[in-house]
Amino acid sequence: MEINFSLDKFIKVTDNVFPEHVLNNLIKICKESDKFDEARIVIDTEGGEKINPKIRKTLSWPMNNIGIESLTEVHWANLLHNVFTRGINKYKEDLDVQHNFKINDIQILKYNLGGHYKLHIDHSPSIPRTFSCIFLLNDDYEGGDLLFKFPNGGTEMKIEKVKNRLIVWPSNFLYPHAVLPVTSGERYSVVAWAL
């Protein structure tokens, strides 16, 4: 018996996540923030990390709501946590997925000129992620496309850049993806993963 289905069916897109004024406030905070550092990649099964701009060239600002003195930062961390929780719950409902989850990491990312992330998957032995999410904050840049390259013969799917767009998909080996190099402007997005 042959089972025939398309992997792109499991990538879900939701537009207009925030009201326009809320989105604009978040973008303004991102542009004014000095909290961004070079993003890291996981390099071993124990969860060791390192900076490698040949693989991932972007800046990251982890969003936490614990141990943070800034109430503004706590507010945004909680609001973004809610966005991703709602997005994953909608994903589960749309696809009839029965899985409890816990969001374990949220990061605001800033891709400057040349910023990219080579083809990778989000699940690893040290961080067994189930769901991956990207919330695109802006679309006034060139390049920086989110590209999926499915393992079934190398089929590719590029997600159109639309500000205020949330994308949710499985973190497993069937969904290798990349952020293509930014060729003009700055790309702001928020990523989250759930176990």
Image: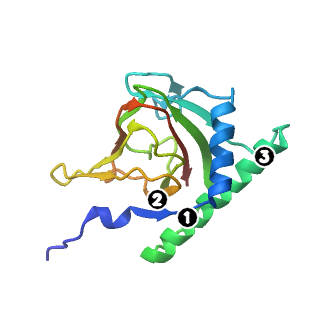
Q: Is residue 98 visible?
A: no
Question: Dividing the image into 4 quarters, which one contains the N terminus?
Answer: bottom left
Q: Is residue 163 above or below residue 44?
A: below
> Between disc 1 and disc 3, whose residue precedes?
3
**Label 1 Cα crowd, 10 Å radius (few <14 / some 14-19 / many 20+):** many
Query: What number is the disc on residue 168?
Result: 2
Residue 84 is situated, as x and y percent measured from the top left of the image, at 59, 58
Is the Cβ of the residue at disc 2 closer than 8 Å to that at disc 1? yes
Closer to the N terminus: mark 2 or mark 3?
A: 3
Report the residue at 47% width, 35% height from top: 45
Q: Which residue has dot 3 on it?
A: 74
**30 over 99 or under it: above or below:** above
Q: Determine whether the residue tagged by mark 3 lies in a helix, strand or loop.
A: helix
* Residue type marked 3: Val
Q: Nearer the viewer, residue 30 or 127?
A: 30
- Provide the residue designation for mark 1: 87
Q: Nearer the viewer, residue 78 or 161?
A: 161
What is the CA distance from the residue labelled 2 to the residue labelled 1? 7 Å
x%, y% of residue 79?
70, 55
Q: Secondary structure at mark 2?
A: strand
Q: Position of residue 188 (x, y in %)?
A: 53, 40
Query: On the rendered structure, is 63 left or right of 166?
Result: right
Which of marks 1 and 2 precedes in the sequence? Answer: 1
Q: Quadrant of residue 73?
A: top right
